[in-house]
Image (spheres, rainbow, N blue to C red):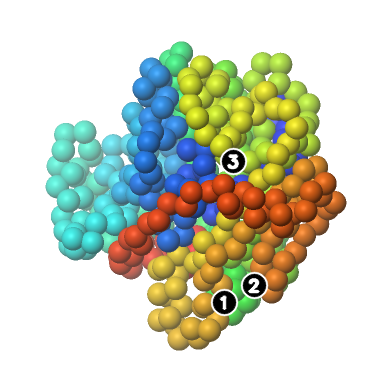
């Protein structure tokens, strides 16, 4: 509704491969399913074999940039692989590029580095010539006290800074830019003067809300729609700038959101269609119309390589040369370990935790069927041409699952608090 203005080819039947950021983006960066690359709730780092999309583009002569307001997409989880420029969440929240990114250090997964050690590393960075020393030190003090929110000098979750960046940057002929915007993500709030909760009254949907242990605040649904309206407004300006510099712009959500359907909130648990059925539009010269072909995040990898005239192999297809749709798989790998730890700390029963901390699968079958496993069994909608369960079994059989060793998930309190804000903890 709010994005009807977006020009280009609209894919009405597009699906994420997972329920949240890391595995969904992992699929976009590799053209493979989360279980194949080992990027999911139990292992959120982009620690995968072979070249990921930015590395492929870099090898092909492209300059690559990543501007992300999402702390899950961070260098310490190897999401900076192949990027010439990486601007992360804390820099976007401060609005200044010459200030040390304190979140980069506190989000480190290195279990050998103590909290003091992480801050010492960041402190030494403050004295490098490319940084504003005093402002970096001041931000470090604020960050230690209150996390990313304490250094938020911008009116939103970073989109306004990205709007400034795209208008100020000069892009060359062979450029790739990846943006990750967070305005339509819990905590829900909009800038002062715009309809919706302001930054002082933000609405957060926590994991306990998601699992039915608590209930979200009144007005949560309206707050979400208000953030979507705001995102549409600011993204329209970002899109104008991008369209003047790039041949193609791909606009896609990595996941959707539950707003009380089936008594579930946020996107922490499950593979409901409200989470996995995502908007996808490719804008560029002569690209118009709509297609009902069933497509997946997997296809974005192959599509971008084709646009760049670079060869690459994956499960995906070039979205601009589609035939018929084909079945798509969705995966849920349980709760992230730090969420389990938080629930245990709050004396939530192990039985309830185990109920949600399990593997689930979903299957899309052309022309318009989608079904998925739940904690209560199985749910599906539409009329498939083939047996959904047979198709699901066939795809699973074709997957060579990567076995991973879970990372050490000790995190600083400010990181846990930020994940709490985002609804993951």
In the displayed structure, 401 sits above or below 164; it is below
Splitting the image into 4 quarters, where does residue 234 fall?
A: top right
The single residue placed furthest to the top in the displayed view is: 173
Residue 218: horizontal and vertical position, in percent?
68, 71
Residue 128: horizontal and vertical position, in percent?
16, 38
Splitting the image into 4 quarters, where does residue 417 fall?
A: bottom left
Provide the residue designation for mark 3: 297
Residue 379: horizontal and vertical position, in percent?
75, 64
| Residue at disc 2, secondary structure | loop
**Do residues under tags 3 and 2 come within 8 Å of each other at their CB atoms?**
no
Q: Residue at x 64, y 20 (%)?
A: 284
Residue 27: horizontal and vertical position, in percent?
52, 43
Of marks 3 and 2, which one's residue comes earlier in the chain? 3
**Do residues under tags 2 and 1 come within 8 Å of each other at their CB atoms?**
yes
In the displayed structure, 117 sits above or below 48; it is below
In the displayed structure, 14 sits above or below 424; it is above
Provide the residue designation for mark 1: 355
| Residue at disc 3, secondary structure | loop
Could you tell me if residue 79 is visible in this image? Answer: yes
Q: CA distance from mark 2 to mark 1?
A: 7 Å
| Residue at disc 1, secondary structure | helix
Q: Residue at x 35, y 46 (%)?
A: 47
Pointer 2: residues within 10 angstroms few (<14), some, or many (20+)?
A: few
Q: Residue at x 50, y 86 (%)?
A: 349
Provide the residue designation for mark 2: 375
């Amino acid at each position: 509704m709010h994005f009807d203005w977006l020009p280009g080819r609209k894919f009405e039947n597009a699906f994420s491969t997972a329920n949240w950021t890391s595995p969904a983006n992992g699929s976009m960066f590799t053209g493979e399913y989360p279980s194949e690359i080992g990027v999911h709730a139990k292992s959120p780092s982009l620690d995968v074999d072979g070249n990921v999309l930015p590395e492929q583009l870099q090898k092909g002569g492209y300059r690559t940039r990543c501007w992300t307001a999402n702390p899950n997409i961070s260098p310490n989880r190897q999401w900076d692989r192949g990027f010439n420029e990486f601007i992360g969440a804390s820099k976007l929240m401060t609005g200044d590029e010459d200030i040390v990114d304190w979140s980069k250090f506190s989000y480190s997964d290195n279990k050998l580095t103590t909290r003091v050690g992480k801050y010492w590393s960041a402190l030494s960075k403050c004295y490098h010539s490319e940084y504003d020393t005093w402002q970096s030190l001041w931000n470090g003090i604020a960050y230690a006290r209150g996390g990313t929110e304490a250094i938020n000098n911008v009116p939103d979750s970073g989109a306004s800074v990205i709007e400034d960046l795209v208008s100020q940057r000069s892009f060359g002929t062979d450029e790739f830019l990846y943006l990750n915007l967070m305005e339509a993500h819990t905590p829900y709030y909009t800038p002062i003067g715009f309809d919706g909760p302001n930054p002082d009254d933000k609405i957060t949907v926590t994991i306990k809300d998601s699992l039915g242990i608590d209930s979200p605040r009144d007005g949560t649904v309206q707050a979400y729609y208000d953030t979507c309206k705001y995102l549409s407004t600011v993204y329209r300006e970002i899109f104008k700038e991008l369209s003047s510099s790039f041949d193609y712009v791909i606009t896609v959500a990595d996941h959707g959101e539950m707003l009380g359907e089936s008594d579930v909130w946020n996107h922490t648990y499950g593979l409901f269609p409200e989470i996995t059925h995502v908007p996808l539009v490719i804008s560029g010269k002569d690209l118009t119309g709509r297609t009902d072909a069933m497509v997946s995040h997997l296809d974005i990898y192959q599509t971008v390589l084709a646009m760049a005239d670079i060869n690459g192999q994956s499960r995906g297809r070039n979205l601009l040369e589609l035939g018929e749709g084909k079945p798509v798989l969705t995966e849920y790998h349980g709760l992230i370990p730090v969420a389990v730890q938080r629930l245990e700390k709050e004396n939530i029963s192990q039985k309830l935790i185990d109920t949600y901390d399990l593997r689930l699968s979903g299957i899309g079958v052309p022309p318009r069927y989608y079904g998925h496993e739940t904690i209560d069994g199985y749910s599906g909608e539409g009329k498939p041409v083939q047996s959904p369960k047979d198709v699901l079994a066939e795809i699973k059989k074709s997957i060579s699952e990567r076995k991973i060793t879970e990372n050490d998930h000790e995190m600083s309190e400010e990181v846990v608090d930020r994940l709490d804000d985002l609804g993951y903890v």
